[in-house]
Amino acid sequence: MKKSKGQFLAITALVIVGLMFYTALSAAAINMGRTLKDYYHVTNFADIYVKVVKIPQKDVKNLENINGIKRVAGRVVFDVPLKVENEKEKVNVRVISIPDKDETINSLFMKEGAYISSEIKDVMVLEQFAKARKIKLNQILKLQIDGKEYNLKVKGIVASPEYIYLMEDEQSLLPEPGKFGVLFVSNKFAQQSFGFEDSYNEIVIQAKSEYDVEKIKKKLEKILKRYGVKRIITKEEQLSNRMISEEISQLKKSSNTIPLVFLGVAAIIIGVMVSKTVKNDRMAIGVLKALGFNNVQIIFHYTKYALMIGIIGAIIGTVFGMVLSGYMTKLYIQFYNIPMLKINFYYRYMFLAVFISSVFCIISGLLGARKVLNILPAESMRPEAPKVGKSIWLEKIIILWERISFSWKIVLRDIFRNKKRFVFITFGIALTYAITLIPLHQNHLFIKIFHTHYGTFQRMDYNINFSRPMHMKVINDITHIVETDKIEPKIEYPFEIVYGWKSKVVTVIGLKKNTEFYYFVNLKNKKIDIPKKGIVLSENLARYLGVKKGEQVKIKTFIPDREDIYVEVKEIIKQSLGINAYMNIQQMNTKLLDKKLITGVYLDTNDNVKEKLENAKNITSIKSLEDSRNVFKQFLKLTIFSIGIMILFAGILGFAIVYNATVMSISERRLEFSSLRVLGFTKKEIYRIISKENGIMTILGIIMGIPIGKYMVYSIMQAFNTELYTLDTDVALSTYVFAGIFTIVFVSLSQLFTLRKINGLDFMEALKNRIS
């Protein structure tokens, strides 16, 4: 082991990385899951959310009589603008009413201050928003409700289980805590300010654990229809919960796949290495057998080497993994704003890691040492006959062979005479290339999503939402206030799209037939317009429902006195972010809503829209495309670190493969290199021969790595696709090129480390040993 400490360290590094991934990702996923479960339990996280037009307080309480419902609470929820110092800045807040005592569903977790004491003057602020805007206790916040300004004193800073991941809606997938926040006010204040005396516009429900939430949801649809149900959301569909649940699920998937790659490669290298060692120790093994040692004892001796790598790698890997899981959990919990941190060390994963690693290494060690069985004591006393130097097929093409230089002939002969080693290194380089390709593709993908969604797909400068549906005439009012280059009406309303037994509540967007603010392309990359009749579905929505172009879907409406309608799916379009359906605005007006009603406008302008519409009544939010781009840019900065880590680990994999294979090759070819030295070759020239061999294998490895990497990218992106975003599996040419450059760098680095081995070779000694 002393002579091969470099190889030992390189293989152990692979085991360490593999088990570090396994332990860190598994423990982080469990810690996250348990912390989330406990947080939801302590705060009585709701199972069902029902948005209605208006429901009396007394009728909300009656819902507790429905079988399966454990607890019910009503609340008033509205999005309104918050006045801030910078008048040009538009900040929206969601005002949510809470009961007098915080002993109900979705209880708040107090971080600073106290609960509301004055029913009409106090407010509690969501922690993420308070941090982003540096809001302090006793600070006065100025809310604007229906054109009237309200001053509220900050009584407490709180965390909410409902806003672990702060998202305004499904259209804005990335948190923007400085621009959107949540304020909790008393029921009395909310009901008076929003005109909801003794009534609510939202119901939160906790179900009894043994009851099926979907069945309760169906009952509620019928019972609450007369109150104008807008949407019913289950716990699984709740945005914040869905985002964190998907993150935990992806952590679990990664913990089961990534370590296998590293352990698998380590096992192959160990097997080859032990096999070569047995070959070199042939004479010693023969002597041992002559002295009475049996095959099992000798094989066990060589397997100990593999086992040592497995145990040392597992211990170091799991220790690093446990430490890393603690940091990962803290980072996740800070990012997702869960105030109850629960970090545990799961020793069973440590034992499991040692077991898995030992099994991998023992099997590889046994396979590598099995040649011991063929060694006979008498035969082994004689030096092994050198391999017969057969001519390779290239030598038969005399015209070509004569034109090849002597050093290249050595390279080609070695490659064709050692096909197994050649295939192993080439495949290892291909694997390194493929693993490097994945994070580089992710980086390219995020940038592509950024440019495609915020620029090519959505093209409006501003997206303005109204607090309630308004007549089309409001467009004239807006154009009188703001100088617009282009303006179009829109309808954004949630409906349930039903196909067979599958259904999904999504925001259906009504647009002009030839809208200039969206650029739709179908799955064949052909530009399309919104059809006069029928519906257009985003790719991820169509995939979820299992519906195809030309089939009929039902649009289920919760609006009172409106019938469900059936429409044909006219097209399925590509949409990277969000899950939506699109219809002609006239069809929506006629079939689903009232005529001439719209819920907002899109517009292009160079005018100061936010400032001019700041005090406009009935405007809930003004979103600019530039704001969305800036949020996405911040998200990209966060991803660069994780992408860098993935590339580093791919580099370790490539380094270990090439370094070990090259060192074994040098060791095997000592006699050949000694002969070359006698013929006048310098050490540099011998190093160049090895470099040429590795160069050929690198080029072929990269070529092989392209389809392997493409398949891995496809599999991972398909597995990580969610209803909220679609990850493109088409890898860009530049990504292939960069992955190739990184692979060449990794191979070159590992080869530089082998230079010391060549310099340390005692060529004359090798020749003498052979002659004797």
Image (cartoon, rainbow, N blue to C red):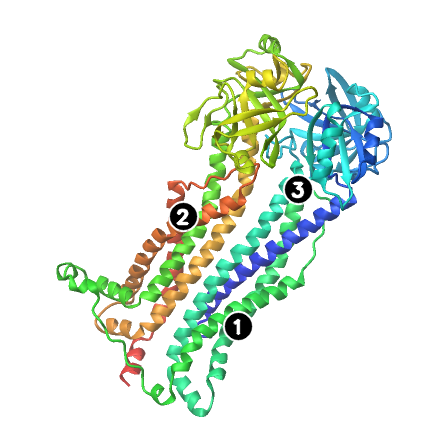
The residue that appears at 47% across and 77% down in the rendered structure is 302
Where is residue 90 shown, x and y percent of the image? 64, 23
Disc 2 residue type (three-letter): Ala
Q: Residues within 10 Å of mark 1 (few under 14, many from 20)?
A: many
Q: Nearer the viewer, residue 120 or 40?
A: 40
Where 391 falls versus 725 (above or below)? below
- CA gap, disc 1 and disc 3: 41 Å
Q: Position of residue 378 (x, y in %)?
A: 35, 90
Q: Nearer the viewer, residue 508 or 333?
A: 508
Q: Are marks 1 and 2 in contact (CB under 8 Å)?
A: no
Instruction: Report the disc number at residue 307.
Output: 1
Residue 232 visible in the current orientation: yes
Q: Are marks 1 and 3 in contact (CB under 8 Å)?
A: no
Mark with earlier residue (3, 2) = 3
In the image, is 133 to the left or to the right of 481? Answer: right
Q: Quadrant of residue 193?
A: top right
Local secondary structure at mark 1: helix
Question: Which amino acid type corresponds to the residue marked 3 in the rendered image?
Answer: Tyr
Element under label 2? helix
Q: Is residue 701 left or right of residue 391?
A: right
Task: Return the residue at label 2.
Answer: 739
Vertical placement of residue 273 versus 56, above or below:
below
Q: Nearer the viewer, residue 596 or 261?
A: 596
- Choose the circle earlier in sequence order: 1 or 2: 1
In the image, 440 versus 222, the foreground residue is 222
Q: Which residue is mark 3?
A: 336
Q: Quadrant of the C terminus?
A: bottom left
Give whichever of discs 1 and 3 has the lower sequence position.
Answer: 1
Counting from the top left corner in percent of width and height, residue 363 is at 49, 71
Q: CA distance from mark 3 to mark 2?
A: 32 Å
- Characterize the local packing of mark 3: few (<14), some (14-19) or many (20 or more) Cα atoms within 10 angstroms: some
- The amino acid sitting under disc 1 is Leu
